Structures are given as C-alpha cells and as structure tokens.
Amino acid sequence: MTYLQANRRSYQRSKQAITVTIVIVVLIIGALQLFVPHFFSSLFSSITRPFWRTEFSIESGALQSPEVLLNENESLKQQLIDAQVRLDTIRATELENVELKSLLGRDLSIPEITTFGTSTSVVAPSSTAHKKNVSKKLEQFTLSAVLKRPPFSPYDGLIIDVGTDNGISSSSLVYASGDVLIGKVVDALAVTSKVKLFSSPGEKFEVLIGPQHLPATAIGRGGGQYEAQVSREVSVNEGDFVINSSPSNKPFGVVNAVLQDPAQTFITVLIAPPVNIYGLRWVLVK
Amino acid sequence: MLKHITYRIILDILIALLIFYAWWFVALPLALIGTWRYPYFVEIIIAGFLYDSLFAPIFEMSVIGYIGTISAIVLFAGSILLKKLLRK
C-alpha cells in the first residue's frame, strides 16, 4: 500500500513537471513571436528552402537528359528571336503613336504603356537601343523563382526565393511576365519572401474596364480572380481588357465572365489576370 | 515499445516533409491518425505552427495568420476528449 502511494506521488510530480515545462515553452514561443516576429519564419524558411529549391529544379526539368535540354534551349532561343521581332514592331507603332501625338500638339511626357517604372523616354525601334533599354529596365527588377504558389497555401500568396539579402523589402511590388502587376511583398525574410496577391479575398484595386475605360473597383476573390460591379447601362463583354487605373496603364486582366441578374441594377464582371497564377514559375520584384 | 517510437518518428518526419511542401491536405489525415494512435500527439501542434510560420504573412497578427496552429490545438484537445469518452 505504501509502495503504491509513493508511486502516485512520483507520478503527480512528473505530471506537474511536464505541465510547467509546457507552460514555459509556450511562453517562450509567445514572447519570441511577439518581440521577434520573423524569428520562427526565418528559421523554418532557411530549413525548408533547400527542399523547395529541389522541387523547383525538378519541376524545371533538372532531371531531363542533356539532349532534351539542348533542344529546349534552341527552341526557346528561336522563340526569343521571334518575340524580339514582334516587340520591335510594337515599338515602331509606339513611336508612330508619339509622333502623331506630337503632330496633334499632345504632351509627349505621358508614360508609355509598356515602360517599366515611370520612365518617360521615347525609345527608337532600333535593335541596339531597344536591347539597352530592356537591360536598363531589367536592372531595376530582381528576377525570382516562385517556390510556392496557390492553391496549396490557404493564405493565397506566393513564396519567392529572394529576400532582404537581395535588396527586397516589405512593400516591394511583384510583376508577372508581360509587366502584369500581381502582388506585393508583405514579409521579406533573409533568403525568401512572402507575397500577397492582389487577388487575395477582400483586396481592392481601382481598374478601367474595356475599350470605354469604365472605372470600377476590382475586389479579390482568391486564386487570381477578381470581381467588379458596373452599371447595367454600360456594355462590358467577355474578353475585354482591364488595365490599372494609374498613369502607367499596366495590364491588369481580362474579363472572364459577365453575370447579369435582372433584379439588380448592376452587373458583376469577373476578371482573370492575363497570366495563370497557378502556373507562375518566375516573377520580377521591384 | 521501440517499434512504437520508431513508427511515431517516421510519422513525424512524413508530416514535417508534407508541411514543407504545403501538402496540408495529406498531412492533416496523417496527423489525425497520429492523434488517434499515439497518446498526446503534440507533434500536430508543432506541425500547425510550422505551417503558419512558413506560409502565413507576419503582418496578419489576427486569427487569420494562425489558422494552422489554432486548428491543430482544436484537433489535439478534441482527440484527447474523444478518446477519454470512448475508452471509459
């Protein structure tokens, strides 16, 4: 009987010790989270980054044979040359546009649609000048691999492989290919960053819809989708282009669907970005 | 006993790897199996915290930024209560 009582006492003592330990651990974690909010995030991201990089490399075809990679390289080079030619044509049209505006007495200092940043210079469509301009633009950006993207995260964000070590800060803007603004860095860690997409639920963005440039507020629905409401009186069609309501007029998305309810005085426009968020592999950070 | 611990460690590693790759929809059923199979499976809370630390933006100091941790605590406490009720 005495033996059993001693055992119970020791059991209770160890139970108390475990409880005290748990409380201390929870308090330490809580204090760290409160006073050094990036501590655990940075620690775990540093541990996880090699796993994410490996996954990215495998997805990028690192395990393919050299022959396949060489062929792909050749094909991409050819595509780049084709794109260069198309871009030169667009540049020529832009230059013509500027010349026509100058003939009509319009101010030439309106920012160009395709220009990165707020540069107001007009670029001649010559190949050398164009290449210089492109490299100058790229210098302003940091190319980053997308390590994690929706739909795996319930937070509807991206994890990119550049951080404060690469000069990234919270509030840096994130662009997809084609100069499409898709989000901003909300949490810059040492070697990775968390990006909040503008399409996250509840995020609001001023846009202009269609050829008539109808002003509207696009509200994020998650997964790269937006919705906006406009008056029934106006005409909005599927496939209409949507641009940012800013002087730079950067592409924002395309009208995906138009929902009409006879009982409502407005129509709901669903907007999808021109790039597939689920397929994003590289982004530019400014 | 050793076999028991070995299986538990394997399950922990598997859950951690799935969390690294953000496969929460696979990690969750495994964590539930763990809570049912093993006593005081606190690893589920660690997994939830790990998930939030990796993927939730810090600026969200509201409940939204701690979905993983809160869900894990609820599941952990729920499993203990459920086991007590069923094994009475």
Image (cartoon, rainbow, N blue to C red):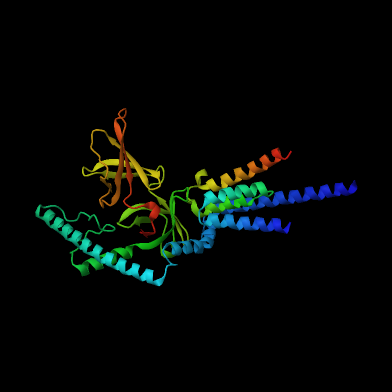
Question: Quadrant of residue B50 in the image?
Answer: bottom right
Work out which residue is located at the far top of the displayed protein and give it: A263
Work out which residue is located at the far right of the displayed protein and give it: A1
State whether residue A4 appears in this view. yes
Position of residue A232 in the picture relative to residue A187 (left or right): left
Which quadrant is the N terminus of chain B positioned in? bottom right
Question: Quadrant of residue A96 in the image?
Answer: bottom left
Which quadrant is the C terminus of chain B positioned in? top right
Residue A122 in percent (x, y) is at 19, 61
Looking at the picture, tell me which residue is in the foreground, A96 or B82: B82
Residue A111 in percent (x, y) is at 22, 55
Residue A222 in percent (x, y) is at 41, 45
Position of residue A6 in the picture relative to residue B35 (left or right): right
Position of residue A130 in the picture relative to residue A40 (left or right): left
At x 82%, y 48%, the residue is A9
At x 42%, y 51%, the residue is A196
Residue A49 in percent (x, y) is at 50, 62
Numbered marks: total: 0
Position of residue A221 in the picture relative to residue B59 (left or right): left
Work out which residue is located at the far left of the displayed protein and give it: A103
| A8 vs A77: above or below | above
At x 31%, y 41%, the residue is A257
State whether residue A34 appears in this view. no
